[in-house]
Amino acid sequence: MTRIITTGCSFTHTSISWANYLKEHYDLVNVAEGGAGNEMNIRNAILDIHKNNYTHCIVQISGINRFEVAVDDHIDSANDWFIPNENYTWVKSTGDQEWWLREKYQTATQAKLVNNALTNYTKHCYSEPQQIIRTLTAIVNCQTLCKHKQIKQLYFCWKDEFSQYFDTIKKSKELTAWWDQIDWSLFWFHNNQGGLSEWCIDHNFTGKLDEDHVNNPPKGWLMIDNKKTMIGHPSAECHTAFAEQVIKPWVNNTN
């Protein structure tokens, strides 16, 4: 019997995602966290794999620059940037490092807490090598566990995520060593390094039109460096097509 676990950021967590579409066709558990980084998303999958039996694991890689900070306080909030535990709460960076500074939080207390936690982290702790190694080690750990449990694996990126870090990785023996530990044969890439975003555009889909605040009328894409680039999240039509044309064939071929 096929039983699948999926994880990733909002590209996988959203209600219209490829993963949630596949729930109609398979026994599937989706542990993705919108706005979370790769360390948290893969950690969620690893913990669930330790607890339950799966035949397939699908991991969508998100932005390497994303991170989470644990603060010593339990915060009950409707804001999904907070993930409360018994006596601490995870705060997700969500977008790029400046994104959360522009957003409005529910209360002044929460705003102050988020600003203190994330500002201090980005000022004193954040570094590109650390972010890269968190993603690489998370992938290695997940692959090792799945191979041990004989779980079939597939990894793909939300967009071309790795290319921008190639130079940093090549200059570091430690980062290169972790890079080389990854089984890249388990990855699906669109045209060498691309991900779901690039696949979406090249198959004549767009980003969600309600997220396009650049074009009037909205088109769901923008030309950047002479390249058609998706704006925002993939449309529902894109998610469905990706599930049908990329993910389902892989699942069915590995059964």
Image: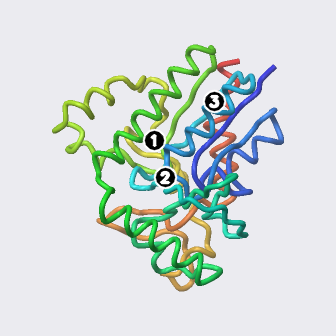
Question: Looking at the picture, how far across and down is residue 99, in whole percent?
Answer: 45, 72
Question: Looking at the picture, how far across and down is residue 131, in whole percent?
Answer: 36, 48
* 195 relative position to 90: left or right: left
Three-letter amino acid code of the residue under disc 3:
Cys
Q: Considering only vertical position in the picture, is 115 above or below 22? A: below
Mark 2 vs mark 3, foreground winner is 3
Say whether disc 2 or disc 1 marks the residue closer to the N-terminus: 1
Q: Distance between the Cα atoms at labels 2 and 3?
A: 26 Å
The residue under label 3 is: 57
Camera-nearest residue between 192 and 98: 98
Coloration of the structure image? rainbow
Quadrant of the image occupied by residue 242: top right
The residue under label 2 is: 202
Q: Residue furthest left?
A: 171
Camera-nearest residue between 134 and 163: 134
Quick one: SS at disc 2?
helix
Three-letter amino acid code of the residue under disc 1:
His
The residue under label 1 is: 190
* 30 relative position to 150: left or right: right
